[in-house]
Image (cartoon, coloured by chain):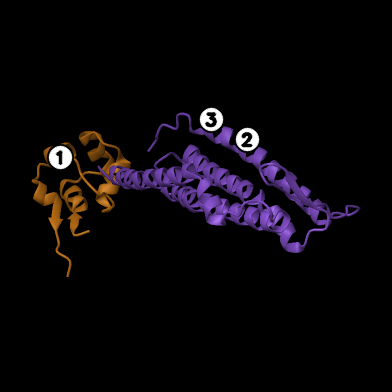
Amino acid sequence: MQTKRGLLPVLATVIRILTWVAGLGVLVVVIATAGEFGWLPGNSAGPACVDTGSRLACTDHPSMAQRLADAGDQLPSMLFSLGALWLLLRFLRTAAQHGPYASAVPGRLAAFGWFTLIGGPVSSALEALSRTSLLAGLAPDTPAASWIDRWFSAFPDWSVVAGVAALTFAHILRIGVGMREDLEGTV
Amino acid sequence: MSISVHLDELLAARGMTLSQLANEVGITVVNLSVLKNGRAKAIRFSTLSRLCEVLECQPGDLLRHRPPP
């Protein structure tokens, strides 16, 4: 049965471009992080820094834990964005190629929904943990705040809302797929 | 499914082919084949009515309910 694709191919193209841009961004950050770790040839280990709000606290000889915390301050949200964009692209590409009521479409939208619902808060928690750990090591004089306070203050509400919305639409789409299958079997 | 379609028997009794019936009823051979092979999930009253008109039969001659064992 033919179904209208509408803007789906256009949306898929836009998201494909955004995914490539995000992928390149992650690649740049990963290479920069590897450089800071001193893993790249001809590159010595760099300092680890954290913004205290009033100044930039750095150490030239960070421990491995401080290096990991420094990387964990920015990598999780970038990886989360890349993953979410890729899952969104997978969903849109399938819907554009096989129609919005193809049997694989609801599962792909649900995968995006679960990833966004769980991945957003988890990446935000990892960043809060890393920042708290770095601040405790590099700027012990700054007012102490627990990682949970930091997490709640930067909690990604949008990611939870987007995840729940995607899961709801996936459920509605699943019903639509069943209706389409019934309709195809109607003589 | 516990509903069986007896289109084969009716066609044989009337000496008709599937494509002749499809032409007279006004549906595609593919759809009629889906019905004949028991792959249909539903049948419209309009289709059933046209089939009964052309085959000069009652819906019960075409469809039978067989309760699962």
Front label number (2 vs 1):
2
Image coordinates for residue A25, horizontal then vertical, percent: 69, 42
What's the distance in space between the residues labelled 3 and 2, CA to CA? 11 Å
Task: Name which residue lies at 26% across and 49% down.
Answer: B40
Dot 3 or dot 2, earlier in sequence? 3
Shade of chain B as shown in the rendered figure:
orange
Helix, strand or loop at label 2? It is helix
Helix, strand or loop at label 3? It is helix
Q: Is residue B25 above or below residue B68?
A: above
Q: Residue furthest bottom?
A: B69
Front label number (3 vs 2):
2
Helix, strand or loop at label 1? It is helix
Shade of chain A as shown in the rendered figure:
purple
Front label number (1 vs 3):
3
Chain letter for the residue marked with disc 1 in the picture = B
Horizontal side, residue A51 vs residue A102: left or right: right
Question: Label 1 sits on what residue type?
Answer: Phe
- Which label number is shown at residue A17? 2
- Which label number is shown at residue A24? none
Image coordinates for residue A122, horizontal then vertical, percent: 54, 55
Image coordinates for residue A121, horizontal then vertical, percent: 51, 51
Chain letter for the residue marked with disc 3 in the picture = A
What residue is disc 3 on? A10
Few, some or many C-alpha atoms within 10 Å of disc 2 (few <14, some 14-19, many ≥20)?
some
What's the distance in space between the residues labelled 2 and 1, CA to CA? 50 Å
Chain letter for the residue marked with disc 2 in the picture = A
What residue is disc 1 on? B45
Horizontal side, residue A60 vs residue B51: left or right: right
